[in-house]
Image: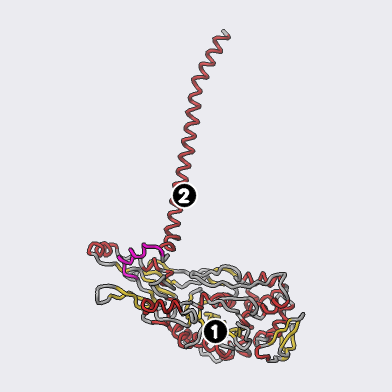
Amino acid sequence: MIRLSNLLKKEHTDKIRPGRHHIDSNRQIGVITYLFLALFIAMLVYLAYFTQTEAKNIINSTYNKRQALLESRIIRGDILSSDGQLLATTMSDHDGGYYRHYPFRNTFAHVVGYSTHGVLGVESMENFTLLTCDGNIVSRISNDLAGRKNHGNSVRTTLNVAMQEAAYDAMDDRRGAVIAMNVKTGEILCVLSKPDFDPNEVIGRWDVLNADTKNSPLLNRAYLGSYPPGSTFKIVTAYEYLKEHDGNVSDYGFECRGSFEYEGSVISCYNEVSHGWVNFDDSFAKSCNSSFANISSKLDKKKFSETINELMFNDELPLPFKYSGGFSDIDASSSTEDLLQTGIGQGRTLMSPVHMLLITSAIANDGILMRPYIISSIENANKGVISRTRPKEYRRLMEEKYAASLQKMMREVVVNGTAQRLLDTDGYNAYGKTGSAEYSENKALSHAWFTGFAGDDAPEIAVTVIVEGGGAGGSVATPIAKRVFDAYFN
């Protein structure tokens, strides 16, 4: 009986074992199915990401042969100013072909760019958009069947024609850059660089323009220029001093005799001018190098370095185009000489005009930097809006109380300091900081800087100007900024 019972148990066990194998098999199939499903979903997600983000960048590449295919089927779209004026358009020639036309010629050369020889400016940024047709589908099919080209989408920029023309005329034949931004929205309003070129003549003069290393006419100095900031950097130094003293600088005083010596380092005022007794605001308004060297000597090097980096030096800038980033090598181990030179914007410190503009814009906007943008909207050939850029906050660069202090100090620069050429204005109040930045062994040579903002009841737009080898910022760069402010407000 025992043997029979054991035999029956064994037979029963043998019968259920295949069922367990079947369950395990189903589980394995389920795992593999879910794995393939997960991979499929991941591929769909990547495809969506690629289509929305990377495809445009890849197609915009000058090495992508698909551009030629698109150009054979699409008439390149227009580039417009903020008020709809044509900055770039495609026209037909007598032979049935097409060519790119730039109505304002040199005025918008660097910011709008050109569509040949590697592409530049907005032409490059929106290359894919301009060669894409999102118009009426019936018209598109009809044109395709008839062998006619469809019109590409148009790009409406944030650029202000009046401001751009004012900057172009004011800069005249000098080298340098002007760039302006709406501090409340982040709209880039004006981008000028000189020496310049006529984009209508790029094809015929490419070899000459490209070989001109002395003048570098193809270089957009507003974005890619890298300069010592000179006294405009005193904005950063003053901000650090305010932070270290919790905004209370009423007890600061200094007797300026035209130079300052500290631990063997000597800093002289511009043209060795003696400013006499100055408080903190006076030091800033009169751009006293001696006083600011004294201020710098009292700073905590490590904290100063952290503040500099918080203002986007040695870091990426939130810009939709190629740019030159700011550089500063101050840290806790820096020498006294390096500290003093950095405090007045000299030494190894470098920055681009657009970087200076972003810092200035944040001060004007109570410490908050809006994300800069230059493309307002994308429109199809029927003027229908496909997409529109909305203002976005980038981040807070400084506490509101320190921004308010700097606003007050920058107003004093205009009222009683080095930017008094901006005092007589119609319909707006101006704020600013001038600079004269040495750039060679010859101390008599300097770049002329101005950076500031203006508004009626509250700051509205910021403008930064640099004139290479221009000398004093107050007498050379400031009047250029005034012409740009006037064009916006009047």
How many marks can you see?
2
Could you tell me how far apart the alpha carbons at marks 1 and 2 are, in whole angstroms?
A: 52 Å
Q: Hey, which residue is sitting farthest right in the picture?
A: 263
Q: Nearer the viewer, residue 85 or 127?
A: 127
Left/right placement of residue 62 relative to residue 484 reads: left
The quadrant in which residue 149 appears is bottom left
Residue extent of the magenta highlight: 63-76
Q: Amino acid at mark 2?
A: Ala
Q: Which residue is disc 2 drawn over?
A: 42
Q: Percent position (x, y) of residue 288?
A: 68, 86
Question: Does the image show residue 364?
Answer: no
Q: Secondary structure at mark 2?
A: helix
* Mark positioned earlier in the residue sequence (1 or 2): 2
Q: Hey, which residue is sitting farthest left in the picture?
A: 146
Q: How is the image coloured?
A: secondary structure
Q: Nearer the viewer, residue 228 or 179?
A: 228
Which dot marks residue 275?
Answer: none
Q: Percent position (x, y) of residue 25?
A: 48, 31
The magenta stretch spans residue 74 = yes
The N terminus - image quarter: top right
Q: Which residue is disc 1 drawn over?
A: 468
Q: Secondary structure at mark 1?
A: loop
Q: Amino acid at mark 1?
A: Glu
- Above or below, 361 against 7 in this view is below
Name the residue at 62% across, 82% down: 230
Q: Percent position (x, y) of residue 416?
A: 63, 90
